[in-house]
Image (tube, grey):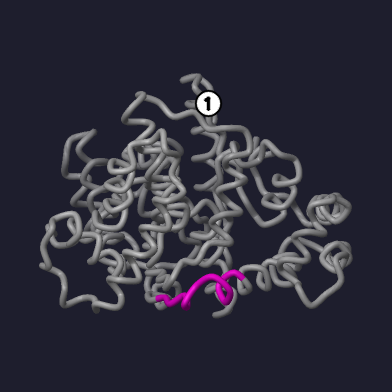
């Protein structure tokens, strides 16, 4: 039942990475992540991999660590104690989503660094249209989420995916919404919660209790692909739709990896409690999911770290200095210079003022929402 969506097993991983090793792109990737080695180093290393965990420990741990050291000012974290106290694993890590691969990648690095079980990672099938990318990510314990415009296909694939999650003996990372947040507002989709409930055989409370949902909040000081998100939002508002170009997702992955991110914080939040689930169950059918989504959103927002860049954007948009105690003049000048560099790359055909407004809201909205709470 799960053959089309499950991660590769050890044998399939060895076969897939042999194909990856022979691909022309692997030499370029090797040069980027192993600059002190010969161009063929990564290919040779991939041929020595004996299985999925070996690949993660031998290759991915180095790659993610390289990204962290080279493009961030440090990745901090909180809440690891929730993995070892109270509820038993496996956990379903329900996370906000800002970067296509790094949200989950940084989490894997932290878990590996602290000898905690890694997670399987749910990704949309739009990212596995390229066989080269598919071989890499399915070797890295990634679950394929089938997306379709056909309602029947969506329903059938959702049932299978829901059953896979409920039957898994591994921790699983899953974004709390379909696609990255493009406006800085991290909200859980009720449809996703309904999908998770599909495979349950008990009542609402027991169905969600057995999933062990742990909300996770990922915060970036500098939003990855921020200007691309702001421009996409402007196009969508202006034309009513946005159509991705071929290879756009792959390009976003590479940009996200290479761009400076400033500081990054991962907050592992307290898992949903039985009391919270029982409270949600006291509502009517549709309101149950709405209330549960609000509980998850609150945990993610509480765990979200507000950096100076976010406070600065909030003050720029409101033309005041309400949050000025949270940043210095030097930090403001540096962020404004960053904004000017970003907007200079926007096509002249776009409404640059509107695009800049979108970009500022990506940063400012978490501040506005957090202070409303």
154 and 103: which is toward the camera: 103
**Which residue is tagged 1?**
148
Give the percent coordinates (x, y) of residue 270: 32, 67
x 43%, y 70%: residue: 264
**Residue 211 shows up from this direction:** no
354 and 112: which is toward the camera: 354
Give the percent coordinates (x, y) of residue 54: 76, 68
Q: Looking at the picture, does residue 245 appear above or below residue 360?
A: above
Give the percent coordinates (x, y) of residue 146: 56, 34
Crowding at label 1, few (<14), some or many (≥20) Cα neighbours within 10 Å? few
Q: Quadrant of the C terminus?
A: bottom left
Which residues make up the magenta segment? 67-77
Q: In the image, is residue 247 part of the stretch drawn in magenta?
A: no
Secondary structure beneath label 1: loop
Q: Looking at the picture, does residue 346 appear above or below residue 99?
A: above
Q: Is residue 141 left or right of residue 268?
A: right
158 and 64: which is toward the camera: 64
x 27%, y 47%: residue: 357
Residue 28 in which image quadrant: bottom right
Residue 113 in which image quadrant: bottom right
x 66%, y 40%: residue: 128
Q: In the image, is residue 69 part of the stretch drawn in magenta?
A: yes
Q: How many marks?
A: 1
**Residue 322 shows up from this direction:** yes
Q: Is residue 65 left or right of residue 193?
A: right
x 40%, y 41%: residue: 231
């Amino acid at each position: 039942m799960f053959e089309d969506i499950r991660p590769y097993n050890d044998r399939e991983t060895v076969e897939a990475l042999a194909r990856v090793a022979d691909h022309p792109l692997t030499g370029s990737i090797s040069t980027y992540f192993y600059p002190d080695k010969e161009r063929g180093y990564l290919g040779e290393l991939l041929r020595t991999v004996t299985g999925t965990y070996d690949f993660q420990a031998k290759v991915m741990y180095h790659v993610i660590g390289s990204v962290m050291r080279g493009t961030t000012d440090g990745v901090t974290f909180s809440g690891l104690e929730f993995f070892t106290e109270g509820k038993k694993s496996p956990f379903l890590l329900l996370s906000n989503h800002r970067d296509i691969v790094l949200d989950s990648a940084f989490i894997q690095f932290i878990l590996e660094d602290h000898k905690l079980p890694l997670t399987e990672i749910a990704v949309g099938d739009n990212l596995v249209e390229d066989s080269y990318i598919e071989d890499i990510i399915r070797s890295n314990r990634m679950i394929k989420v089938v997306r379709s415009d056909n309602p029947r296909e969506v329903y059938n694939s959702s049932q299978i995916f829901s059953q896979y999650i409920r039957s898994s003996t591994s921790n699983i990372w899953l974004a709390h919404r379909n696609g990255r947040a493009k406006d800085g507002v991290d909200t859980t989709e009720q449809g996703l919660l309904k999908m998770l409930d599909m495979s349950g055989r008990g009542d609402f409370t027991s169905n969600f209790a057995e999933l062990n949902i742990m909300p996770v909040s990922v915060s970036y000081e500098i939003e990855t692909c921020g200007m691309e998100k702001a421009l996409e939002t402007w196009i969508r508002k202006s034309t009513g739709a946005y159509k991705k170009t071929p290879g756009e997702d792959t390009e976003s992955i590479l940009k996200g990896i290479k761009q400076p991110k400033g500081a990054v914080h991962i907050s592992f939040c307290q898992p949903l409690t039985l009391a919270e689930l029982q409270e949600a169950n006291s509502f009517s059918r549709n309101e149950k999911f709405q209330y549960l989504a609000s509980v998850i959103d609150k945990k993610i927002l509480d765990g979200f770290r507000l950096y100076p860049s976010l406070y600065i954007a909030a003050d720029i948009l409101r033309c005041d200095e309400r949050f000025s105690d949270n940043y210095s003049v030097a930090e403001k000048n540096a962020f404004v210079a960053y904004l000017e560099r970003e907007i200079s790359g926007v096509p002249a055909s776009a409404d640059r003022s509107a695009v800049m407004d979108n970009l500022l809201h990506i940063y400012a909205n978490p501040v506005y929402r957090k202070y409303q709470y």
